[in-house]
Amino acid sequence: MSNPDPVDIFRIEAAELLEQMEQGLLDLEHRLDDRTLVDAVFRALHTLKGSGAMFGFDRLAAFTHHCETAFDRVRKGLAEATPELVSAVLDARDHMRALVEDPSGDHADEERYLLERLQAAVSGAAPLPVASPADGPVAAAVPASPTTWCIRFSLPENTLVNGTNPLSFLDELRAMGECRVVADRSALPPLEKLDPTALYLAWEVTLTTDRSRADIEDVFLFVMDDMTLTIEAQADSASTPEPGPSATISADGPLAIATEPSPDRPAPEATARPANDTADPRLRRKVESVRVPAERLDELMDRVGELVIVQSRLQQIAATSSDMGLRTVSEEMERLCSELRVTMMVLRMVPVATLFDRYRRLVHDLQRDTGKKIELSTDGESTEMDKTVIERLADPLVHLVRNAADHGLEPAEARAAAGKPEAGSIRLSARQTGGEVIISVTDDGRGIDRARVRTKAEAAGLIQPGTTIADQDLLQLIFQPGFSTASSVTNLSGRGVGMDVVKKAIESLHGSIDLTSRPGEGSTVSLRIPLTLAIIDGLLVRVGEGHYVIPLPAVEECIEISQEEDLRSRGRAFLSLRDTLVPFIRLRELFATSTKPDPYQKMVVVSTGDEHVGLIVDQIIGHHQTVIKSMSKLHEDVTAFSGATILGDGSVALILDVANLISLGQEQEAQLRAIA
Amino acid sequence: MNKPALKTKDVQDAPIEEIEALTFEIGGETFALEAAIVREILDLLPETIVPGSRPFVNAVINFRGKVIPLADIRVAMGMPTVATTIDSRIVVVEMDFDGMPTLVGLRTDKVNEVTALSMVGSEPPPRVGLRWPPQFIECLIHRGGTFIIFPDLKAIFASTGRSSQPD
């Protein structure tokens, strides 16, 4: 555990690089002349090639090399970035992933095909730097006569540890022309403090060359983010003042010299990093992060749970004590504990952007497969959700996006005929309301064809022919197993698996699905998902001597039952509530409680969607923030409870499984109807 | 206690000589469990009854912030229930269910000791003449004129919980 396999580390790194590459390519697709993106993709390719070779992934390195070469040509202005190139490299990226995962597999055919495509894409673009001087800033900036440059650079101390050899930069510079190198030793510490693995030197290089400034910058391309670099053209190359071996440089501490921007080119930092406003937010969001196995977080969560329990015991002792000091400490403990709990919750949260990013590629592929033009827009990516929830949403959302692209959006001709823009739009949005996050997939396609849904449902025996059915109920039918309205089965969707799988997945997250659709204008599927699986808002109730938690989102209302009503409803299992009959379950009977019932019984009406059931309890205690603990395998057969939680006094309360209780109520009702 | 007691199983000279076991009493009988699976011995804790569960695992307890089931061998074996005493303890064991390590508490009347038990004199439960369902017993070990019962926890937990003994 302490020493992970280096190959595994490489795999993680490779996955990140491939991810960066994919996002860069997808952005590039929209902004083909954005040099920043070209550079970003190039760097990802280059790093992947380098570390691949280092860890023995030779085929990966060899294959990546071709893509790198292609991108290098684009970077140098020798070729143009084209949609074909982007698409070819995207497919090549998938192949790279295969090579990372299974380096020994047989990939020869795939490789040949991809390289041919790549070749075609690069040679297809006009390789004429002269023809488009404006597009190729590098090529355009080549100065005709030799210039003398003064280059000062310093690298971070840990450069050598990272495996970068500064001498290689000097060698590259020397290869460009006449070169004079002076080392700046001013930062060198006394011998006893010297760390042999640290880099203390900086360099000043006087280089006379006919190469451009951009060429010189390229030498430092891969270290540019961390280093200090200044490149100045000497005004008069003949009378260059030779700086003394270290005297002048060390005097003013040249390590921090800011880059002097030249008038016609952006500063090197600006080329290396995306400009803040235009570039993709993903590239900007490089915050330092630590990978932690989820179970360690769970362990920590357990510890916090125990701490909260101990704290509440301390609080109880302090409340009965007259010791002011003890009371103060107890209050402080309480505040710290609640803060700690909030922090723990936040630790598990990740922005929805990590989820939405995956669908950009999906949409790219869907465009190719459906032949439809699709614009994907996203909204509310910064909304945060529990990581486990996000992982479990990934597949259902794939189904929904596919459905929108395949069934929702019309082909281009039909869109033109309906007066819609040629490109169909699919929108992914996320927003938080209270303890829920609503994620919706919206398309501007043809909407759901009610008549077809009805025909299908009748054919499948889901509804009786000719029944009147509310619009929402009709739409909900598409979530039934085996239902599909696509008249032709495509390889994308339409196999009739999908929507019911989506529904199941969402329900397993304690979420729900809303569907709205206007004929001709498009559909929206909204998933309402609780923020986290680890904690819910609950209503704490007492039945006999036991405490139970009812998930608050399911609670509709609480009613006190008068004694007459209580007597009248004996022997029946439903009450009339504002002219509707609500079936109810006496939890005392269900749980076989042997204590005396409280004189005033309360009813908590719970629902999922349109189905209600009343749960009769002895006492409603109040709101309770519930940390959910799952029940063990030994209690798997108990359907009335979905989990357990620990109360402030350390005792355990069970969490009622509302969906199961409702179906129990429904059964009861059906039985009673049958008798009546 | 830390030594994995059944390690000798892997060694070539097959017959297990001795195992480290925790002995405890339920209903006047002495039971034993392999010490390696025992995590902790607790004083009685507040129990929460789980309505609708199988009778021999009818409750859960809060064990260091975890909610773990509390099982009762007495109920599984069809022995009469008695009131708890000052000696009553909960023995927490770790068991594997479908690849998931699971903690389970066991109600006991009294915990005796961790001791080395000679497995030489062990024998399978007799088919007849036993007060308890034989499928719940792994083996019986003779010691000092009496015998110690090794319950088969897996079989107990896998059962439906309705004791097959008429009484």
Image (spheres, coloured by chain):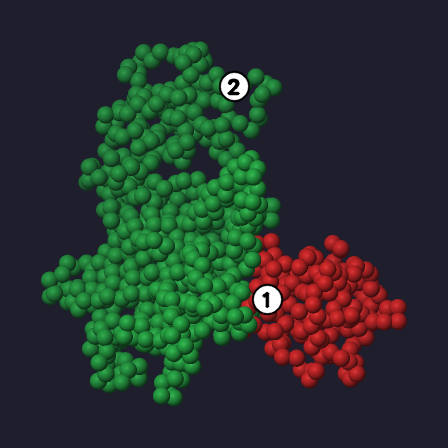
Chain colours: A green, B red
Quarter of the image for residue B115 reads bottom right
Does the rendering let one see residue A371? no
Q: Quadrant of the N terminus of chain B?
A: bottom right
Q: Chain of mark 1?
A: B
Q: Is residue A593 visible?
A: yes
Residue pictured at 45% horizontal, 22% vertical = A202
**Local SS, label 1:** strand
How packed mark 2 is, by other alpha carbons closer than 10 Å (few <14, some 14-19, many 20 or more), is some
Q: Position of residue A493 (x, y in %)?
A: 31, 70
Q: Amino acid at mark 1?
A: Ala
Residue drawn at 42 percent across, 56 percent down: A623
| Mark 1 Cα shell of 10 Å, populated few (<14), some (14-19), many (≥20) | many
User: Up-down: is A298 above or below A217?
Assistant: below
Residue hosting label 1 = B59
Residue B3's disc number = none
**Vertical order, A423 against A34 (above or below):** below
Most foreground residue, A73 or A521: A521
Q: Which residue is mark 2?
A: A188
Q: Which chain is home to disc 2?
A: A
